[in-house]
Image (tube, coloured by chain):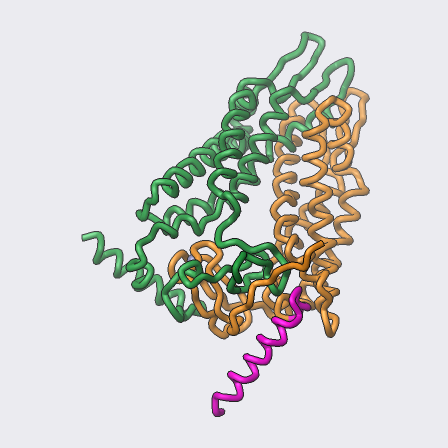
Chain colours: A orange, B green
Amino acid sequence: MPEPVFNSPTTDLRVVACPHCDLLQRLPALAAGEAARCPRCDKELWRRREDPLERTLALAIAAAILYVVANTVPMLGLSAVGHHASTTLFGGARHLWDDGQEIVAVLVLFTAVVAPALQIGSMLAIVVGARRPCPPSWVGTLLRHHPRTATWSMIEVMILGVLVALIKIADYASVNAGLALFALGALVVLLAAMQSAFDPREVWARVEWADAAARSAVERAARDAAAEVPS
Amino acid sequence: MGRRGGAKRRGTRRARRRRRGAVVTTAPVAAIQRGWQSCEACGLLSRPGADAGACPRCGEELAFRKHRSIERTWAFVIAAAVCYVPANLLPVMVTTTAAGSAPDTIMEGVILLWSPTGWPLSLIVLIASIMIPSAKILALVYLLVTVQRGSVANNAERVRLFRTVELIGRWSMVDVFVDTFTAALVQLQPLMAVEPGPGLLFFAAVVVLTMLAVESFDPRLIWDAAPSEEVVHA
Ligand SMILES: [Zn+2]
């Protein structure tokens, strides 16, 4: 494999380009909870969080526990004229597969089971790794892919779908929501809290660089700039 | 009249933003005009050498704009529009009772749900399954056409439209989940059974393809046609 070619970083890490309009700007110093927005397109560029690593870790652990509960206990039960049926999240996808809808079954399984697991798991690994004194580069690799897991994790959409299905079926059979549905509801809230407690800039500031020489050059430049300004 | 009113409105909006933590624009130029590349994954700005390289911080391959953004977005949008037709014409659900089988398309499902008590559900399905997918396809076509024409009008509105499409697109998956769990539960043979219909695959394809189209669209293209003078005074 050829050696990768790296770009040379700009020396001031506070100067960024807006991801939605490319406008160059310098991020201001923010107090926790404050956000900086792009003056041209209003995209939120950075929201500083209080203790991002500790809070995110706590929420991610809670989410992992709820996730396990939600995927093991029944989600929906149905009884009508002597029939009883219940299904878990996994069971729903499996039924589709048995009916010859393999592709849709995989999509349901991915968006409702696999992507949330990846979202929670990678977040746990990222914050655990970032809390180490010298975060290794795999933390950055996980963080690079984390937003995509959040995009495809659709538990909140699934809950709405389940509620619609429940009310639809209620016309001709008695249905009851299982424990998993309540666990999933709580999980949606936890996942939203976990994402908003997290501050990727905090992790990027700590993580080891792909090009280690570039990082030391940037840090040296920052030290020199600080030394030049008389306090 | 519009110009002065607009300037005034912009002024107050900017003041509100300053209270929320302002961004000080060091130089009112786009990164591309300086020859800088911004990493989509970690946000680091860097200057490419002779060839575009990787981000020195996270190792992501860098480019000024997403690779072949327009072509790839068009491909996904067209594929989504093609799948949209069978998704709406073929049944997504087949209900079998002693009286025979009754296939339902998405629209028939909406109508069936419509009742004095069921109309909120019907409305949810109508919005999520019919209005959002079609609005998404139309919005993406509008963004692609205006970018390809080099339009400089309504940039802020267009980027807001892009963000709305990005935010609400996932909710179209509702119907896939409704049909999945209805079919998994309603297995009361020989009285009644519900099976997924062939339209479901096309409907799921529309959702996935439009999400991929949004992912491959680069909103910075909206601003690239802006004359540099406008950028300077922004
Ligand atoms: Zn912007």
Ligand 1 sits in which quadrant? bottom left
Q: Which of A198 and A13 is in front in this view?
A: A13
View extreme (left): residue = B1
Q: Which residue is drawn at 61% across and 52% down?
A: A147
Q: In this view, does B140 lie to the left or right of B110?
A: left
| Location of residue A202 with respect to A68 vertically, above or below | below
Q: Where is residue A179 in the image (x, y as percent from the top left)?
A: 76, 43
Is residue A213 shown in magenta? yes
Quadrant of the rendered image containing residue A199: bottom right
| Location of residue B20 with respect to B174 vertically, above or below | below
Magenta segment range? A206-231
| Location of residue B97 with respect to A25 vertically, above or below | above
Q: Position of residue B150 (x, y in %)?
A: 34, 44
Q: Nearer the viewer, residue A163 or B44?
A: B44
Q: Is residue A89 left or right of residue B13?
A: right
Q: In this view, does A40 lie to the left or right of B109?
A: left
